[in-house]
Image (tube, helix red, strand yellow):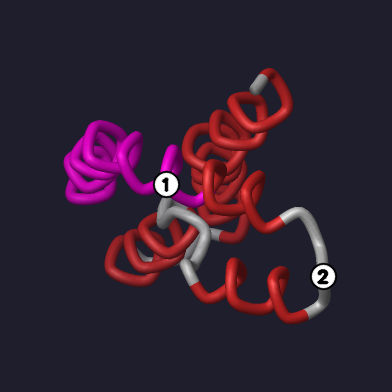
């Protein structure tokens, strides 16, 4: 669970923060910067579970990771939306 939680924090908090820094460094206009930040803030796609199961990987771990990220995104995504609008 530690690895799954660490991955969720990196995906939902660290990646959008890095994307925000890159948009500032590149001088993107606000609309483009908002798009980049919001795409970076999205949780992992559920289709990765199908691919993992088809490749005989650890499907239960992937299911847990994607479920946790989707539920956590309920909290984190509105935060990034409000910051992207500013």
Secondary structure of the residue carrying tag 1 is helix
Task: Examine the image and state in which quarter residue 72 appears.
Answer: top left
Residue 11 position in % (x across, y down)? 57, 43
For the residue pair 39 and 29, the one nearer the viewer reads as: 39
Residue on which disc 1 sits: 67
Residue 55 position in % (x across, y down)? 82, 77
Helix, strand or loop for the magenta stretch, by majority: helix
For the residue pair 83 and 1, the one nearer the viewer reads as: 1
Which residue: 66% across, 26% down?
6
Task: Examine the image and state in which quarter residue 51 appears.
Answer: bottom right
For the residue pair 41 and 36, the one nearer the viewer reads as: 41
Q: Could you give the CA–CA distance between mark 2 and mark 1, rounded to whole angstroms?
A: 19 Å
Bounds of the magenta span? 66-86
Q: Is residue 84 magenta?
A: yes
Relative height, residue 84 to residue 59 (above, below): above
Relative height, residue 18 to residue 26 (above, below): above
Secondary structure of the residue carrying tag 2 is loop
Q: Is residue 23 magenta?
A: no
Disc ID at residue 45: none
For the residue pair 45 and 11, the one nearer the viewer reads as: 45
Residue 56 position in % (x across, y down)? 82, 70
Residue on which disc 2 sits: 56
Which residue: 27% across, 44% down?
77
Q: Reading the chain from its start, which is encountered first: label 2 or label 1?
A: 2
Nearer the camera: disc 2 or disc 1: 2
Quadrant of the image for the C terminus?
Answer: top left
Residue 40 position in % (x across, y down)? 49, 57
Q: Is residue 49 left or right of residue 72?
A: right
Density class for disc 1 (Cα within 10 Å; few <14, some 14-19, many ≥20) is some
């Amino acid at each position: 669970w530690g690895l799954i939680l660490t991955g969720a924090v990196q995906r939902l908090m660290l990646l959008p923060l890095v994307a925000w820094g890159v948009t500032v460094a590149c001088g993107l206009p606000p609309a483009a910067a908002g798009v980049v930040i919001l795409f970076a803030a999205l949780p992992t796609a559920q289709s990765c579970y199908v691919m993992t199961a088809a490749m005989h990987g650890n499907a239960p771990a992937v299911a847990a990771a994607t479920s946790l990220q989707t539920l956590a995104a309920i909290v984190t995504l509105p935060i990034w939306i409000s910051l992207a609008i500013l």
